[in-house]
Image (spheres, grey):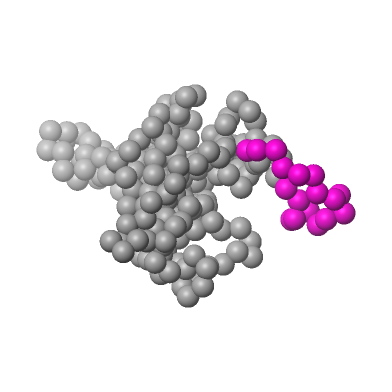
């Protein structure tokens, strides 16, 4: 089952608090005691509250939570080769937030370190304190959901060696990134045309919408 998104979790906690701790609402307690003997009524109420909360959330944010981002098929990271693997506990979401020109969740940065003594930066949209991407611009079949980006997904990272002081400096660079924040879903810059006979998985992604760069 898909994990409840934080606003719905908070709604559930508030309902539980009201049911078990509200001394000013004896009618509620009496109703709930009677409802406990009528399971179908309790289930119907819970479903109604969840549907109403989901509708309200969608109306205000237009975002629901989807499956998390993963590395592309066949791309694996080992602790002793290449970029290494992300060190658990090293990831830090910075306080920096940058508004998107077209609205929606702000942009943010996360830093982390790897087992190969590299410092990495991940860029994405921030929702409820989590870094992720949006299902648009070809990402996640354009489902318009928020997809969390785990720190372990190094394919979505810029990494450079740490210096003697344990710091890493990422050079300023100019590269396109779609509004989804998932660069692999579409091509931000013109790419060479590949032969048509190549397997589908080796073909390049379609160009990103110019309005979303």
Rendered residue at 86%/49% (across/down)? 196
160 or 45: which is nearer to us?
160
Determine if residue 203 is in view: yes
Residue 189: % across, % down: 65, 38
82 relative to 142 in the view: left or right: left
Q: Residue furthest right?
A: 197
Count of numbered tags: 0
Task: State the image coordinates of residue 212 (x, y, percent, origin top left).
Answer: 58, 30
Residue with the most extreme left position: 23
Relative to 164, does residue 210 appear above or below in the rendering? above
- SS majority, magenta: loop
Q: Is residue 49 left or right of residue 23?
A: right
**Residue 51 visible within the image:** no
Q: Is residue 196 above or below residue 29?
A: below
Q: Where, quadrant-wise, is the C terminus in this rendering?
A: top right
Residue located 54% across and 34% down the image: 179
**Magenta part of the chain:** 188-204
Q: Position of residue 173 (x, y in %)?
A: 50, 41
Q: Is residue 146 magenta?
A: no
- Residue at x-position 19% and y-position 45%: 20
Residue at 33 percent of width and 38 percent of height: 96
State the image coordinates of residue 69 (x, y, percent, origin top left): 52, 52
Is 161 or 188 nearer to us in this picture? 161
Q: Quadrant of residue 135?
A: top right
């Amino acid at each position: 089952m898909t994990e409840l998104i934080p606003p719905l979790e908070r709604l559930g906690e508030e309902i539980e608090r009201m049911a078990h701790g509200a001394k000013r609402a004896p009618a509620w307690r009496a109703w709930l005691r009677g409802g406990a003997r009528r399971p179908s009524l309790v289930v119907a109420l819970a479903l109604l509250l969840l549907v109403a909360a989901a509708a309200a959330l969608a109306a205000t944010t237009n975002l629901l939570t989807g499956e998390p981002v993963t590395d592309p098929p066949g791309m694996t990271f080992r602790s002793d080769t290449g970029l290494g693997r992300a060190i658990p506990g090293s990831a830090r979401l910075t306080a920096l937030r940058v508004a998107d020109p077209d609205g929606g969740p702000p942009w943010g940065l996360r830093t982390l370190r790897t087992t190969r003594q590299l410092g990495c930066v991940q860029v994405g949209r921030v929702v409820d304190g989590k870094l992720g991407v949006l299902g648009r611009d070809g990402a996640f079949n354009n489902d318009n959901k928020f997809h969390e980006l785990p720190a372990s997904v190094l394919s979505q990272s810029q990494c450079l060696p740490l210096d003697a002081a344990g710091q890493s400096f990422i050079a300023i660079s100019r590269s396109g990134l779609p509004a989804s924040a998932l660069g692999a879903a579409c091509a931000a810059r013109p790419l060479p045309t590949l032969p048509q006979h190549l397997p589908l998985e080796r073909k390049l992604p379609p160009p990103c919408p110019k309005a979303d760069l």
